[in-house]
Image (spheres, coloured by chain):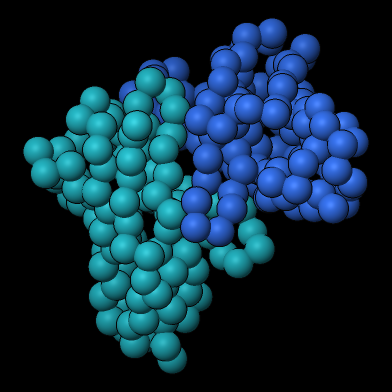
Chain colours: A cyan, B blue
Amino acid sequence: QKEVEQNSGPLSVPEGAIASLNCTYSDRGSQSFFWYRQYSGKSPELIMSIYSNGDKEDGRFTAQLNKASQYVSLLIRDSQPSDSATYLCAVSSARQLTFGSGTQLTVLP
Amino acid sequence: DAGITQSPRHKVTETGTPVTLRCHQTENHRYMYWYRQDPGHGLRLIHYSYGVKDTDKGEVSDGYSVSRSKTEDFLLTLESATSSQTSVYFCAISSSPRSSYNEQFFGPGTRLTVL
């Protein structure tokens, strides 16, 4: 069974700090990797996609992928209170996404 | 929500009754998915569709059926609802031409309570 593991948190960081979210996956055949943000009572929103080893930056967000270690991470620089949400890691294989249970992030003003 | 609507948005029903949830998209995307989200379990795939009348089972398909007679509509049916099917149900769509991409975009969700 394909598994995606995330630290459940909650994770608290002060405003302006870097938040680091981690994810490991079991299926070595996984081809693409995503981070979703989900505010309470809302639907998941895609914020980052990464397909090859290394770093991908988009504004304050950086996704990092290491396929050899089966590890994906998301860094949020200059964290803002509006970043407070649950972050879901998702891994794709054969057109199906497997999700982690999410990490709840709180950014303290 | 990427041109995706779900109906109803909230529903309360009784054990043993049939329930149908609807997902409607205006993006003309080929792939559609149904997930359920429960505390401690994250999002789990119920069924998905890769075209009109083409569907397949996901991780937690028992007790659910689906139909897709038009590109824009994907229906999820609980033939006889049980309390264990109380959940939030999300529809998602994907148009990625390559399976290695598979970016999915989610609808607003349906909160279903089975008493």
Is residue B6 toward the left or the right of residue A109 in the image? right
Q: Quadrant of residue B48?
A: top right
Which x, y percent locates residue A78? 31, 77
Q: In this orientation, which residue lies closer to the viewer: A103 or A48?
A: A103
Q: Residue at x 43, y 54 (%)?
A: A101
Q: Quadrant of residue A105?
A: bottom left
Q: In this orientation, which residue lies closer to the viewer: B38 or A73?
A: B38
Q: In this orientation, which residue lies closer to the viewer: A77 or B20?
A: B20
Instruction: Tally the numbered discs.
Output: 0
Residue A58 in view: yes
Is residue B1 toward the left or the right of residue B97 in the image? right
Is residue A80 toward the left or the right of residue B94 in the image? left
Q: Quadrant of the C terminus of chain A?
A: bottom left
Q: Residue at x 35, y 26 (%)?
A: A93
For the view shown, which residue lies furthest in the left direction? A68
For the view shown, which residue lies furthest in the top direction? B53
**Residue A39 sits above or below residue B111 on the image:** below
Which x, y percent locates residue A7? 31, 63
Q: Residue at x 69, y 8 (%)?
A: B53
Which x, y percent locates residue A43? 61, 53
Q: Quadrant of the N terminus of chain A?
A: top left
**Residue B111 sits above or below residue A76 on the image:** above
Q: Residue at x 68, y 10 (%)?
A: B52
**Residue A35 sits above or below residue B101 on the image:** below
Residue B93 in view: no
Q: In this orientation, which residue lies closer to the viewer: B92 or B86?
A: B86
Which x, y percent locates residue B93? 59, 31
